[in-house]
Amino acid sequence: MRWARHAVPAAAVAAVAALAARDLLQREHALLRNFPLLGRVRYLLESVGPELRQYIVAGNDEERPFTRDQRRWVYASAKQQNNYFGFGTDNDIEFTPGYPIIKHRTFGRAVPPSAPTVGHEVRLPCAKVLGAPRGRARAFRPESVVTISGMSFGSLSGPAVEALNRGAALAGCLHNTGEGGLSPYHRHGGELVFQLGTAYFGCRDDRGRFDLARLKDLVAEAPVRALEIKLSQGAKPSLGGLLPAAKVSAEIAATRGIPVGRDCVSPSRHAEFSDCDSLLDWVELLAAETGLPVGIKSAVGDLDFWTELTDLMRDTGRGVDFVTVDGGEGGTGAAPLIFSDSVSLPFQQGFSRVYSTFAERDLHEQVVFVGSGKLGLPDNATVAFALGCDLVAVGREAMLAIGCIQAQKCHADTCPTGVATQNAWLARGLDPRSKAVRAAHYVKTLRRDLMKVAEACGVEHPGLIDADAVEILGGRTTSTPLREVYGYRPGWGLPSAADRAAIVDLMSLEAPQGGSATPSPTARR
């Protein structure tokens, strides 16, 4: 026993000495060569830096991409816990240029109910009928203004995709498949938007070419409500993608229609079209063959594309049924830093330019506009609706709802909560059924808060909030209406008069108006 007591410390000292000797002799790291052992402490602290900042150092409004307050709101909403905040805002409102302020109305058409729990289960459908202006055979009104954004099986684990799809079914909202194909995990009750990326996963032949027959078979046997042609995304526009061979499992290969265990490449461009004219031809082909509404998803850079697209839509009668605009602040599993940080416009600037291009040609009332890029928070979503969005697509916020802790390990396949990984051991920690309930709670809470804000603005639906209802602060002493910031004309940002009337009628049935106590005999009515 006496020998053992001395042997363990001696072995530890010998190991440390050997490590120090190795550091002194190696030539790869100058820091370790000059400061053996101490340099390793520095590397250790660097490796856990994000965790130290997230849990110990950072303030409530400092972290990115989502602050502690924002994450707390999502987590509490998903768990149906108290998501209120006390003692006033800790945002630096008066000194933050660009900060949006929503203007409530003292008297408005809509009267908010007084009970705090009223509206938790409110139905909040889209203010427009998707596909109706172009007479699509399977046009429909989306049941929820909140949708789950495109995140592929392969980027997310199977249990994560299943949780989101089950959650979409519980919340009655659409679930976008992402470009990775329609997997078994997408088949748990949630209605789908099938995304067509550049590799045509799930509807391609053995040579990787688009196969219309396979697409028609797919949409015939799955609850697909619309098709979305992905041109680009905010975090990595104009880039293709690579799923390394090691991650191409049998499940992923079957879903995508690719060989097992080989690198899976997504090209940077589509093969089915090469300009706006041929794009619109393909849109009309897909719509005619499937009967589904067809739209596009894109980040915003050069506006020439949008100008040419809308000119052709105005002049030829062909057109897309919806447009998803993805902001440069949007997320992805992996991208070069320069693309994540500096390529493509942020959502508000990009969306307002696209919307204006459609509106100048009187096309804005014929298209459903979907916003994407950190819009899963009530304040950001409200501004998006004021700018003209009809739907908002939530991605990373939905990931937070099912367990993501913003570890930012999506690119490394080491997501500790099993959300963004193909590691079977890590993915097993995510229980799809319990997380589905949390995803649904989050979507419903976001809808509830959007409804409350709409009522505070005096209207019956968030799609009826106009660009004059929001002001953008320029600092402590100035502010500018949102309409003036982005050069909107009166009436822009709203659905057509017919669509406004229809959604008011629907909401009057779904959300009874609130009221006051019985007025006194002297009250003037």
Image: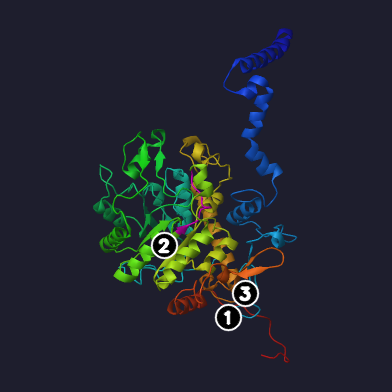
SS type, badge 3: loop
Q: Residue 488, position in %: x, y?
A: 52, 71
Residue type, mark 1 in image: Arg
- Rendered-image quadrant of the N terminus: top right
Residue 145 visible in the shown view: no
Q: Residue 189, position in %: x, y?
A: 41, 56
Looking at the image, residue 312 lies above or below residue 210 = below
Dot 3 alpha-carbon crowd within 10 angstroms: few under 14, some 14 to 19, many 20 or more? some
Q: Are marks 1 and 3 in contact (CB under 8 Å)?
A: no
* Label located before the other in sequence (2 or 1): 1
Cα–Cα span, label 1 and label 3: 13 Å
Q: What range of the chain is rendered magenta?
A: 325-333
Q: Residue 492, position in %: x, y?
A: 49, 73
Q: Residue 81, position in %: x, y?
A: 64, 56
The residue that mark 1 highlights is: 109
Residue 113, label in figure: 3
* Label located before the other in sequence (3 or 2): 3
Dot 1 alpha-carbon crowd within 10 angstroms: few under 14, some 14 to 19, many 20 or more? few
Q: Is residue 131 magenta?
A: no
The residue that mark 2 highlights is: 323
Looking at the image, residue 90 lies above or below residue 488 = above
Residue 81 visible in the shown view: yes
Q: Quadrant of residue 154?
A: top left
Q: Is residue 331 magenta?
A: yes
- Rendered-image quadrant of the C terminus: bottom right
Question: Taking 182 as reference, is 409 left or right?
Answer: right
What is the residue that sits farthest to the left in this orientation? 213
Residue type, mark 2 in image: Val
- The residue depicted at 59 percent of the width and 77 percent of the height is 458
Looking at the image, residue 313 lies above or below residue 175 = below
Residue 328, label in figure: none
